[in-house]
């Protein structure tokens, strides 16, 4: 990878090839650029003992889209840190794999390693401290951050990490059958599929738009499944992921850097356009569509669950969609958001912080629950949604960390600006000191480290407040109960994530269900006895009336 000169005044580097929200192709294969934003540059020939902590941001976008361009640095510059953003190869161009040395995969992650290494080797020229680098990312960028924590290729390149709404332990972050996906892409662009070499040689000759169309045509449910994502590299030298993330985590051969990780309250709100535009009529016309199509489709495209899907679906429906009209889209939306949030983000975030905290590394967990003037879902959808509030959706915390260069932003309120100041302080305090918040007062109450026995977290709302045991019922359901119901031989999370609280909770729930079942059985028996007695009484009265009629008849005649 070579580095040339670029006019730093032009902040318009192209992202990797991708579709925009209007379905237009944008970006270019020549996309590997790095942006460095610094409060001040060292004077030529002078020596300054002051160096800035460095924050390197990895953008999200399902490993298929996104760009460093939109993340403006203005909100962070007053905090005395250097911000670095960069592009990396995306989608098929960054993550296609044949499962062997022909195309080992993870090119996008290896781009990230090169960028991080370049920053470490050169950031002192910008006034930065190469020994105080914090890696942070959102969505698939957060999953990338955890992979860098675990990867042998990234050891020693950074000293702290922040993961926003994603982890390498999320089901959507890893592709288990890369050769099958490579063959599907090849087939869709009319390439031979008989060998990895034939696939790769042919794909190199195909137009970018054809490959992007093939990638889009593999989607079943909105943007899912995600197939052009990281893979385990089974052969070759310099493997970025030599094993699954959970196995690398359990092996423990990595530097235990301080970690901050969290989720937004309504992550799954990004499914709103899919439900409204694609499935509204089907839901209205078929009251069983939720049960027979929508939930099974969600399971098969966003999770690793494959067995006993009908029973898994019924359990999900009972847990999230009980006592609502399954043909009423407005009633389905919020339960669906809750379900997808738990399945795709809450459960794997919990598994990550729980398991990582047992390694001895400092861990701080948060939930972002503030709903301001702007919403990433509304920005993506184009107009404010009059009759539906998407809540605090995936990516909403970015509105308070960065000066985002996106269309449709409304003027932030005074409270928005106050929350933004707090969020920026929390993030930059962590980058500077490895813990947050550094200054404890009425505005910033103490943020205790996450411990398996207490499971404390920080709620970022209108105010800041601590909490504990975040959504443990949902976590246990998605990491333990549903995989067991599906007959999965390996749990979706590490055995380290099992805890006394969840076991106690499930014992309580189990006994509660047994008690309810016994009570219902008793009620049924009582009702049967009552009905039986009523029937006997009615029969006796009927016989008595009949005999009386006969007797009266005899008397009359």
Image (tube, helix red, strand yellow):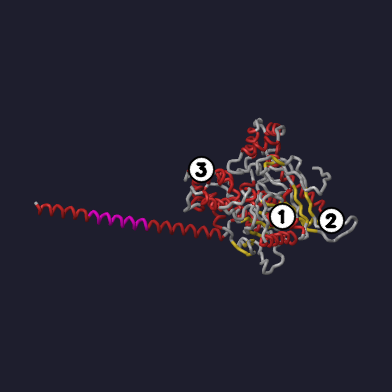
Where does the magenta region start and end?
Answer: 523-539
Q: Residue at x 58, y 56 (%)?
A: 498
| Mark 3 crowd level (few <14, some 14–19, many ≥20, 10 Å Cα) | some
Image height of 66 relative to 214, above or below: below
The residue under label 1 is 402
Mark before the other along the chain sequence, 1 or 2: 2
Instruction: State the residue in front, 83 or 482.
Output: 83
Q: Are marks 1 and 2 in contact (CB under 8 Å)?
A: no
Q: Can residue 301 be seen here?
A: yes
Image height of 274 relative to 371, above or below: above
Confirm whether the magenta stretch covers residue 189: no
Left or right of residue 410: residue 54: right
Q: Can residue 306 be seen here?
A: no
Q: Which mark is residue 41?
A: 2
Mark before the other along the chain sequence, 2 or 3: 2
Confirm whether the magenta stretch covers residue 527: yes
| x then y, percent, for residue 356 | 66, 56
Circle 2 sits in a helix, a strand or a loop, which is it?
A: loop
| x then y, percent, for residue 552 | 13, 54
Q: Which mark is residue 282?
A: 3
Instruction: State the residue in front, 208 or 532.
Output: 208
Q: Nearer the viewer, mark 2 or mark 3?
A: 3
Q: Are marks 1 and 3 in contact (CB under 8 Å)?
A: no
Q: Nearer the viewer, mark 1 or mark 2?
A: 1
């Amino acid at each position: 990878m070579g580095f040339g000169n670029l006019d730093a005044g032009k902040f318009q580097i192209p992202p990797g090839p991708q579709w925009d929200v209007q379905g237009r192709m944008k970006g270019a294969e020549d996309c590997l650029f790095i942006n460095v934003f610094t409060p001040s540059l060292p004077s030529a020939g002078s020596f300054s003992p002051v160096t800035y902590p460095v924050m390197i941001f990895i953008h999200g976008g399902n490993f298929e889209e996104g760009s460093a361009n939109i993340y403006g640095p203005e909100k962070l510059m007053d905090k005395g840190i250097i911000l670095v953003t960069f592009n990396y190869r995306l989608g098929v161009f960054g993550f296609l794999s044949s499962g062997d040395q022909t195309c080992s995969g993870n090119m996008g992650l290896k781009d990230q390693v090169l960028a991080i290494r370049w920053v470490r080797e050169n950031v002192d020229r910008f006034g930065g401290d190469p020994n105080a680098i914090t890696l942070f990312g959102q969505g698939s960028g957060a999953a990338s951050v955890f992979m860098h924590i675990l990867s042998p290729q990234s050891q020693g390149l950074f000293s702290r990490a922040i993961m926003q709404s994603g982890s390498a332990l999320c089901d959507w972050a890893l592709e288990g059958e890369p050769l099958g996906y490579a063959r599907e892409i090849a087939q869709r662009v009319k390439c031979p599929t008989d060998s990895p070499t034939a696939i790769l040689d042919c794909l190199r000759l195909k137009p970018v738009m054809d490959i992007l169309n093939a990638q889009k045509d593999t989607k079943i449910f909105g943007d899912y499944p995600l197939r052009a994502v990281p893979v385990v590299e089974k052969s070759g030298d310099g493997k970025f992921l030599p094993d699954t993330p959970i196995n690398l985590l359990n092996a423990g051969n990595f530097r235990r850097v301080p970690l901050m990780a969290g989720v937004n309250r309504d992550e799954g709100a990004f499914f709103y356009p899919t439900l409204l535009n694609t499935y509204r009529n089907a839901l209205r016309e078929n009251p069983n569509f939720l049960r027979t199509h929508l939930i099974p489709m969600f399971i098969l495209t966003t999770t690793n669950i494959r067995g006993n899907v009908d029973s898994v679906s019924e359990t999900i429906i009972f847990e999230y969609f009980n006592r609502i009209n399954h043909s009423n889209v407005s009633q389905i939306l919020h339960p669906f958001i809750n379900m997808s949030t738990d399945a795709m983000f809450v459960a794997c975030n919990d598994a990550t912080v729980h398991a990582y905290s047992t390694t001895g590394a400092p861990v701080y967990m948060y939930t972002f629950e503030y709903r301001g003037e702007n919403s990433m879902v509304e920005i993506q959808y184009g107009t404010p949604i009059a009759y539906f509030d998407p809540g605090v959706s995936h990516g909403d915390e970015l509105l308070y960390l960065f000066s985002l260069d996106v269309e449709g932003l409304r003027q932030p309120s005074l409270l928005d600006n106050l929350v933004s100041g707090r969020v920026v302080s929390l993030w930059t305090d962590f980058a500077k000191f490895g813990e947050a918040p550094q200054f404890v007062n009425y505005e910033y109450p103490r943020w205790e480290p996450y411990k398996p026995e207490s499971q404390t977290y920080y709620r970022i709302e209108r105010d800041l407040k601590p909490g504990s045991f975040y959504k443990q019922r949902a976590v246990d359901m998605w990491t333990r109960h549903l995989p067991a119901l599906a007959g999965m031989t390996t749990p979706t999370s590490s055995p380290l994530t099992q805890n006394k609280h969840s076991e106690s909770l499930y014992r309580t729930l189990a006994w509660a269900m047994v008690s309810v079942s016994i009570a219902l059985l008793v009620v049924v028996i009582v009702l049967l006895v009552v009905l039986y007695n009523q029937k006997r009484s009615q029969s006796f009265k009927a016989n008595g009336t009949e005999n009386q009629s006969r007797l009266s008849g005899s008397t009359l005649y």
